[in-house]
């Protein structure tokens, strides 16, 4: 058989396998019955609307919700607006998604009745979400304050899930590019992306020094930025160690990520601080503040949506064609998806109140205050520690097994 004939045969086989995979997976999910893929976007939109309502209650509730004075739990609307109003709406959002989590966790097959509940019944779920946004305004203030303390823990869980998801994706990308199948083909692209990540990190660090540490008296900001440089260098050294041999791509991308977190942390400092000149300028430019707020709000909603898709949805080692035994499996974990949204509701509330239930936020601001700053910094340090541990864990565990065997 000639080379061209073999090539045509291989191409025909690949096309048949591709068509078979498309018919058995994509078309089955997109063209028949309840649509779990489209359901993700509907849940994401509902999540965004609920949190927009929480923001409206915080910034414009005193003028628009004067009727709350009649509610028993509001005590003249004092306990139902502002910061506590955000917690009340967040509590309703949390109850909605946690109820969905309890009712869908463990769903594995598309013919399960819980699949229809997850991907359909939208009229009932929209009415339920509206009711759950209203009912918390009848709850006593003491319980809402307790929920506010509990929400700190839930928001931390969300940050941890998001952090592990990001690190896992970066690690998978590096492993994919360094694999035998793509090593030669992606060598130049990996080098370019790595250099670009380090250059962007360096520029970000320089700009933070210029904007947020203009004086030697700005010791705290100098410490934050300098420690970020140390973490990047430490991650790079560990990754390039001969026993790890992780390359430059992952520490470069992780460096860019922690630089972004450091920038968010310093941006969260109160705008009255003399070392936050850019924050003061932003407060004077109303349109810039509004645009920044909208971008931050959408970014948080998208981040929650992306984190909610578990590892089954991002199967990086996929089979060429699905086997018979998993043909009717759900495309992603419904329970995990809703759990992420439930803790994401708590995280959103913490951003709107600055992680402090007794803190008064200005209009069109999000994630501002010293509590927000320290949460971001702790998240940055945790990200670096988790990444370094993922690099050295195989060596540590391997040495421990050797010691136990001897």
Image: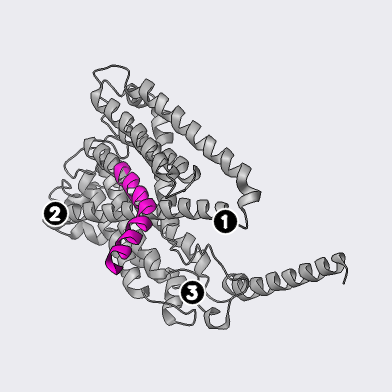
Estimate the spatial distance between the alpha carbons at disc 3 and disc 2, rounded to whole Å: 41 Å
Colour pattern of the rendering: one colour
Residue 381 magenta-highlighted: yes
Crowd class of label 3 (few under 14; some 14 to 19; many from 20; radius 10 Å): some
| Residue pictured at 45% horizontal, 76% vertical | 115
Q: Which residue is mark 3?
A: 330
Tell us which disc is closer to us: 3 or 1: 1
Image check: 34 left or right of 188?
left
Which numbered disc, 3 or 1, marks the residue that appears first in the sequence? 1
Judge whether residue 60 can be spotted in this image: no
Front-most of residues 192 and 205: 192
Residue 46: x and y in percent read 41, 58
Indicate which label's residue lies in the foreground, 3 or 2: 3
Question: Is 194 situated left or right of 239 in this image?
Answer: right
The numbered mark, 1 or 2, whose residue comes first in the sequence reads 2
Q: Which residue is mark 1?
A: 179
Residue 9 lies in what quarter of the image? bottom right
How many numbered dots are placed on residues in this image?
Answer: 3
Mark number, residue 141: 2
């Amino acid at each position: 058989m000639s080379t061209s004939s073999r090539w045509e045969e291989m191409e025909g086989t690949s096309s048949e396998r591709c068509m078979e995979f498309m018919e058995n997976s994509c078309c089955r999910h997109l063209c028949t019955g309840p649509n779990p893929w489209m359901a993700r976007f509907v849940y994401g939109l509902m999540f965004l609307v609920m949190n927009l309502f929480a923001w409206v209650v915080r910034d414009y509730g005193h003028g628009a919700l004067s009727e709350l004075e009649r509610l028993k739990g509001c005590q003249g609307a004092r306990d139902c607006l502002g910061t506590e109003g955000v917690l009340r709406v967040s509590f309703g959002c949390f109850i909605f998604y946690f109820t969905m989590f309890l009712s869908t966790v463990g769903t594995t097959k598309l013919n399960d009745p819980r699949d229809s509940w997850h991907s359909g019944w939208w009229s009932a779920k929209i009415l339920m979400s509206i009711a759950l946004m209203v009912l918390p305004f009848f709850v006593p203030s003491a319980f809402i304050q307790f929920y506010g303390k509990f929400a700190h823990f839930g928001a931390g869980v969300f940050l941890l899930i998001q952090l592990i998801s990001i690190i896992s994706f970066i690690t998978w990308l590096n492993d994919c590019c360094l694999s035998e199948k793509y090593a030669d083909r992606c060598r130049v692209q990996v080098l370019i992306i790595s250099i670009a990540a380090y250059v962007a990190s360096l520029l970000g660090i320089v700009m933070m020094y210029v904007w947020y540490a203009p004086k030697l008296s700005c010791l705290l900001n100098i410490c934050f930025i300098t420690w970020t440089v140390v973490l990047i260098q430490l991650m790079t050294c560990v990754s390039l160690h001969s026993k790890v041999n992780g390359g430059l791509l992952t520490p470069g991308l992780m460096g860019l990520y922690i630089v972004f977190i450091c920038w968010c942390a310093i941006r969260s400092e109160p705008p009255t601080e003399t070392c936050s000149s850019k924050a003061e300028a932003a407060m004077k430019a109303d349109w810039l503040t509004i645009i920044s707020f909208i971008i931050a709000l959408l970014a948080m909603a998208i981040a929650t949506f992306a984190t909610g898709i578990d590892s089954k949805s991002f199967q990086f080692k996929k089979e060429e064609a699905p086997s018979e035994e998993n043909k009717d499996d759900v495309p992603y974990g419904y329970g995990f998806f809703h759990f992420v949204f439930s803790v994401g509701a708590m995280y959103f509330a913490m951003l709107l109140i600055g992680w402090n239930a007794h803190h008064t936020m200005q209009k069109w601001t999000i994630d501002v205050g010293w509590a927000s700053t320290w949460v971001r910094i702790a998240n940055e340090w945790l990200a670096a520690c988790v990444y370094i541990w993922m690099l050295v864990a195989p060596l540590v565990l391997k040495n421990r097994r050797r010691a136990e065997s001897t």
